[in-house]
Amino acid sequence: MLTAWIQIISGLALLIYGADRFVTGAAQSARLLGVSPLIIGLTIVGMATSAPEVLVGSVAALDGKTGIAVGNAIGSNIANISLVLGGAVIFRPFLIDSKTLMREYLIMMALFLLGYVILSDYSLDRLDAIILLLALAGFLAWTVYQARHPKHKDPYLKEISEHVPGREIRPWVSVLLLVGGLLVLIAGAEVLVRGAVTFAQSMGISDLVIGLTIIAVGTSLPELAASIVSIIKNEADMAIGNIIGSNIFNMLAVLSIPVLIHPDSFAKEVITRDFVIMISLSLLLGWIIFRHKKFHRIYGFMLMACFLGYQSWLFTASGS
C-alpha cells in the first residue's frame, strides 16, 4: 500500500512538472511558427493542458484499463467544476462578463449531449472515438474563427492574448521544453497508473472509481492552481475559460484517444451516476453564469460540498 501511494504521489508530481514544461514549449513553438497569441491561448495551450489526462488514459488503455480513462475524463470534468471552481470562488468571489465564455459554455453542453448519446450503449469503440475527434476538430475550427474575427472587445480574449506562456525563448529551448515535457508526462502517467492500479487492487475497488477519484483529482490540480492565480490577477474570465475549455477537451480528446488504443465496455454507473452528476454541476454553472454572473462565496461552498459528497458516495458505494 505504501509503495502504491509513493507511486501515485510521484506520478502526480511528474505530471504537474511535465505539463508546465510541455505547455510552455508548445506555446513558444507555435509562436515561432507565426501563430497569433490569441489562437495559441485558445487552442494549443488548451490542448496542452489536457496532456496529463490524455497520457494517463492512454497508458491505462495500453494495459487494458480503459475504465480508468473513462473515469478520468468524466471525473476530471466533475472535479473542474466542483473542486477547482469551488475552491477558486471560496478563495475570492468574482464577476464574469464575457460573451465568448457564454458561447463556449453552450458548446460545452452540446458536446456533453453528444458524449451522452455515444456512451448510452455502455461501450466505446473506434467509431465513437473518431466521432469525438471530429467534433474536437470542429470545435477547434470554430475557436480559430472566433479568434480571427472578434466582434467586440471581450475581456476573456484580452486576458488570453496577454498571458500566453513562453515568451522570449530560443528555438532550441522551446523544442527541448516540448520534447522533455512530453517525456516527463509519459513517465508520470506510467508511474501514476501503476500506483493507482496497485491501490485499486489492494482496496478491492474498480478501475472506474480510481479514474473518477484519485486520478481525476490529481490531474485537475494544475487547473486549480491556474484558476486561483488567474483570480489573484483579477482575471476571472480566464479562470472560467480554463475550466470550460478543459471540460471540452476532456470529453472529446481524453475520452476518445485511449479508446482508439483499446475499445471497451464500461459499467452502467458511468451514465446513471457519474454523467448525471457532471451534467447537474454543469447546469448549476450555467445558472450562475447566465442568471447572476457573480460567483459569490456561497456558491463556492455549495460546489465544494458537492465534490466532497460525490467522492464520499463513490468510495462508500465501491466498498459496499
Image (cartoon, rainbow, N blue to C red):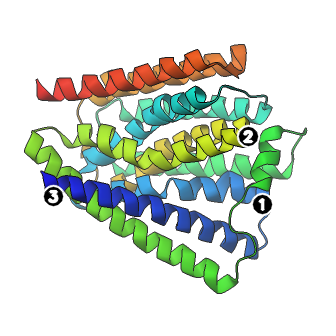
Q: What's the CA distance linking mark 2 and mark 1?
A: 17 Å
Eyeballing the image, is 179 above or below 228? below
Q: Which of label 2 and label 1 is nearer to you?
A: 2
The residue drawn where x is 74% and y is 52% is 144
Q: What's the CA distance linking mark 3 and mark 2?
A: 40 Å
Q: Which of label 3 and label 1 is nearer to you?
A: 3
Kind of element beneath mark 2 = loop
Eyeballing the image, is 12 above or below 190? above
Mark 1 — residue?
37
- The numbered mark at residue 3 is 3
User: Which amino acid type corresponds to the residue marked 1 in the rendered image?
Assistant: Pro
Q: Earlier in the sequence, mark 2 or mark 1?
A: 1
Kind of element beneath mark 3 = helix
Mark 2 — residue?
235
Q: Position of residue 127 (x, y in %)?
A: 40, 49
The residue drawn where x is 84% and y is 38% is 154
User: Which amino acid type corresponds to the residue marked 3 in the rendered image?
Assistant: Thr
Can residue 193 be seen?
no
Eyeballing the image, is 311 above or below 150? above
